Each structure stands twice: as C-alpha cells, then as structure tokens.
Image (cartoon, rainbow, N blue to C red):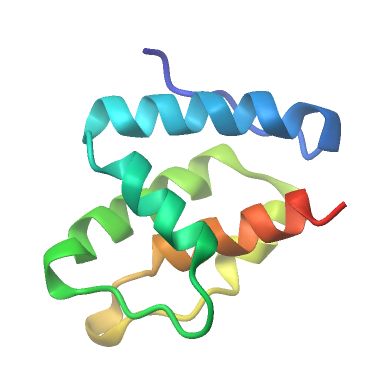
Amino acid sequence: VDKPGKYSGERGDWRLWKARALGWLTAVHPDFGRFLAEAEGHQGDMNVPLSLREMSSFLHTELLTWLTGTQLALVLRGLPLSGGATNGFAAWRTLCEEEERM
C-alpha cells in the first residue's frame, strides 16, 4: 500500500484521499483503522492513553506532511498532550469534521 499523496484541499478529492490514508495507516499498524474510527465519533475532550501516545504523535507527524493550507492550519492548532506530545487523533477528528460537514 502506497502512502497517500498530499491532500489537495478540494472536497471532491476528500473521500479518495481519506481512503488511501486509512489504508496506508492500517498497513502500518492494524489497529489504526479502529482508533481513527473511534476518534471520528468521539465527543468532547480527547484524552489519549499513554499506551497510544506514540501512535498519536506518528499520526500527527504524517498529517503535517500530507496537508497544506487550511487543512494544515487545522492540524497545527491542535492542543499538545501533556509532555509535549501531539494529539494526532484529535487532529484527525477535526480534519474529518471539517471536510465532511457538507
């Protein structure tokens, strides 16, 4: 499975780009699909357990390489976790909410 390319920011490209991102992340770690689905449906503050902090940080880093413009700004404004780690799952949820709200 290839890494997804940059997301263009065009709504018409979102579903295909998201499917490619999910496919690649699930190939990296089989539990990514489940965790991302849970993140998308999560309401309220998203506290990442210590056992998932490395995965969350990895996701955040990947999002930084895949996104530009408005979508990148959404990811960058996410609050860090304690210890300075980044919350990739919250960033994923925010991105999905923004891209799927219409």
> In the image, residue 19 lies at what x, y percent?
55, 27
> In the image, residue 43 lies at what x, y percent?
53, 77
Relative placement, left or right, of 94 versus 51 is right
Q: Residue at x 41, y 14 (%)?
A: 2
Q: Residue at x 66, y 64 (%)?
A: 74
Q: Is residue 52 above or below residue 48?
A: above
> In the image, residue 76 lies at what x, y percent?
57, 66
Q: Residue at x 48, y 81 (%)?
A: 79
Q: Residue at x 31, y 43 (%)?
A: 32
Relative placement, left or right, of 53 versus 89 is left
Choose between 71 and 17: the one closer to the eye: 17
Q: Is residue 6 above or below residue 82?
A: above
Relative placement, left or right, of 70 versus 2 is right
Relative placement, left or right, of 33 versus 6 is left
Residue 47, quarter of picture: bottom left
> In the image, residue 64 lies at what x, y percent?
51, 49
Which residue is outermost to the top? 1
Which residue is outermost to the left? 51
Residue 48, quarter of picture: bottom left
In the picture, the quarter occupied by the N terminus is: top left
Number of numbered labels in the structure image: 0
Q: Is residue 43 above or below residue 8?
A: below
